Amino acid sequence: MKLMYAAWAGDQSEDLAHRLRDERLHERLAAAGVRRLQLNLDDADVAPAMRIATGPAHVGAVISAWADDDRQVTAALSEAVGTLAGWEVDERRPIPPPETAHGVRMAALANVAVLQRPEELDREEWLHRWLVDHTPIAIATQATFGYVQNVVTRQVTEDAPRRVDALVEELFPSEGMVDMHAFYGSGGDDAQLRDRLTRLMASVTRIGFDHDIDLVPSSRYVYDFRPAPRSPATTAARTPARSLTGPSPSPTRS
């Protein structure tokens, strides 16, 4: 299952991004059954980007972990950050993100939006408007090269600052931090930029994603904790020689 967490630094003096990238934490998460870890960190590399907070403090990081059980994962992360809110999610990938090397920062602006279903829409109508109606508009009007939709299925932490129903991950060219044409893919054409903005915002308003939103610009790091597969050469080297040349003698029965 996929778990997602929003993290705030709190009053701890050590930098949140540094704590989350610490190898000792990664070892503990791997021991807790985490196969893959993704860190979206609001750090110095994305300082020029826009960010939005619904509460008094901005979300400092969004953490994704793939594991079979949430309890040990949540416990490990809770000790590493000031405040933590987490959810199990159902993931959809309209535009699968490119793969990156273990622990290497992706060359991109990685935005994560933490979202809430508006009260006036029931869940089924909201999901249809978002996943069916809105998805092609979002793809057509922005320069995204990675787009992941996460529908919250349950909360895995006891406390959360507010109700969260979805988290959206989008990858943009790094230039999109300061250049709207780069962000929306309008190629320097102001008329096209206005058209894309108008279409996108009309669709966003229909699903209630124009308010009660945390927008987290981030640097994205992925870590793979799965054991490396054995190569054929390694397997052959560990195979007794007799199995390569013919059947082994029958064992003597006592």
Image (cartoon, grey):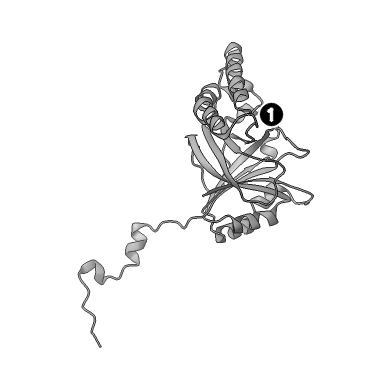
On screen, residue 134 above or below 253: above
| Residue 23, position as x, y percentages in the image | 62, 56
The residue most toward the bottom is: 254
Q: What residue sits right under mark 1 in the picture?
A: 211
| Residue 44, position as x, y percentages in the image | 70, 39
On screen, residue 210 above or below 59: above
Instruction: Specify few, some or many for label 1: CA neighbours under 10 Å numbering under 14, 14-19, or 20 or more.
Output: few
| Residue 94, position as x, y percentages in the image | 48, 33
| Residue 251, position as x, y percentages in the image | 24, 81
Question: Which quarter of the rendered picture does the C terminus lie within?
Answer: bottom left
Left or right: 53, with 65 as reference point? right
**Location of residue 28 by image quarter:** bottom right
Left or right: 54, with 3 as reference point? right
Left or right: 182, with 81 as reference point? left
- Along the line of sight, the residue nearer the viewer: 152 or 140: 152
The amino acid on which the numbered mark 1 sits, given as a three-letter code, is: His
On screen, residue 30 above or below 179: below
- Along the line of sight, the residue nearer the viewer: 87 or 120: 120
Marks counted in the figure total: 1
On screen, residue 196 above or below 250: above
**Location of residue 143 by image quarter:** top right
- Along the line of sight, the residue nearer the viewer: 159 or 114: 159
